[in-house]
Amino acid sequence: MSERLSVSFDERTAARVRACAATNRGGASGYLARLVREDELRQAGDQLAAFYTAHPSFIDDAEAERIAAAGE
């Protein structure tokens, strides 16, 4: 399901969207949707990096728990 949105850009940004839309599948809608998905992926990667920075031993701790649970 898609939803219609109305957006306003300055002239330079609007020109860039039109130019990119002309060469991208799905036109302006497809181009902007791809940018949003890329932004979501980048944000998820940043959140994952922040988690591992805050919990540097997470992977080693998880592996130790897995080994203990398996009785190895």
Image (cartoon, helix red, strand yellow):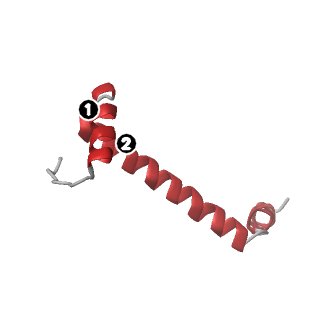
Q: Secondary structure at mark 2?
A: helix
What residue sits 79% from the left and 69% below the top?
A: 57
Q: Is residue 59 left or right of residue 2?
A: right
Of the numbered discs in the image, which one, if any, rests on residue 66?
none
Sequence-first tag of 1 and 2: 1
Q: Quadrant of residue 46?
A: bottom right
- Percent across and percent down for residue 47 are 57, 64
- Percent across and percent down for residue 52 are 69, 66
**Nearest the eye: 3 or 72:** 3
Label 2 sits on what residue type?
Arg
Q: Is residue 18 left or right of residue 71?
A: left
What residue sits 31% from the left and 32% below the top?
A: 19
**Nearest the eye: 62 or 67:** 62
Eyeballing the image, is 61 above or below 32? below
Eyeballing the image, is 58 above or below 21? below
Q: Secondary structure at mark 1?
A: loop
Q: Which residue is mark 1?
A: 26
Of the numbered discs in the image, which one, if any, rests on residue 34?
2
How many numbered circles does the render carry? 2
C-beta proximity under 8 Å, tags 1 and 2? yes
Alpha-carbon distance for marks 1 and 2?
Answer: 10 Å
Label 1 sits on what residue type?
Gly
Q: Is residue 19 left or right of residue 61?
A: left
